[in-house]
Amino acid sequence: MKAYELLYFVDPSCDEETRAGIMKRVDVAISTHGGAADSVEDWGKRKLAYEIDNLTEGDYTLINFHADPEDIAELDRVLRINDAVKRHMIVRRDDKE
């Protein structure tokens, strides 16, 4: 398994139930084939560098996890189809192997 980092943000006006649903779906996508989340950090509201979908702030979450490279495509698909997730980025971490 390889080490990865996922950073995503949602609209800060989303309710807690929506955020929990996103986290649950991400956790299922990671752990389906034996992957595991190492740490989850809630960064809270941060100002965006530029306006995205009429938003100037975003509610950020950072997840460090281990998964097989084949599972990253499924995780990317899950995040793309969720309308609450405005932007996301998945990066492979060589320093956390």
Image (cartoon, grey):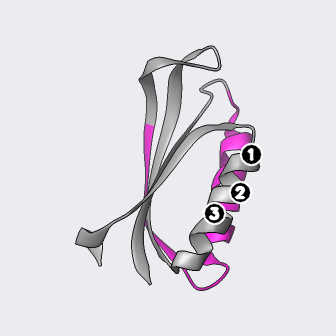
Residue ID at (44%, 84%): 1
* Residue 33 visible, this angle: yes
Tell me the SS state at disc 2: helix
Q: Position of residue 50 (x, y in %)?
A: 46, 17
Q: Could you classify mark 2 by the number of other residues whose Cα lies within 10 Å: few (under 14), some (14-19), or many (20 or more)?
A: some
Q: Is residue 32 above or below residue 57?
A: below
Q: Which residue is mark 1?
A: 82
Q: Which residue is mark 3?
A: 75
Q: Is residue 56 above or below residue 75?
A: above
* Residue 27 visible, this angle: no
Q: Is residue 42 above or below residue 78?
A: above
Amino acid type at circle 3 is Leu
Residue at far left of view: 95
Determine whether label 2 and label 3 are within 8 Å by CB: yes
**Position of 56 compared to 41: left or right?**
right
**Position of 58 compared to 76: left or right?**
left
What's the CA distance linking mark 3 and mark 1? 11 Å
Residue ID at (61%, 77%): 31
Q: Which residue is mark 2?
A: 78
Q: Position of residue 89 (x, y in %)?
A: 49, 49
Determine whether label 3 and label 1 are within 8 Å by CB: no
Residue ID at (64%, 84%): 33
Amino acid type at circle 2 is Val
Residue ID at (63%, 14%): 54
Q: Position of residue 82 (x, y in %)?
A: 74, 45
Q: Can residue 58 be found in the magenta stretch?
A: no
Between 63 and 89, the one lying in front of the other is 89
What's the CA distance linking mark 2 and mark 1? 6 Å
Amino acid type at circle 1 is Asn
Q: Quadrant of residue 17?
A: top right
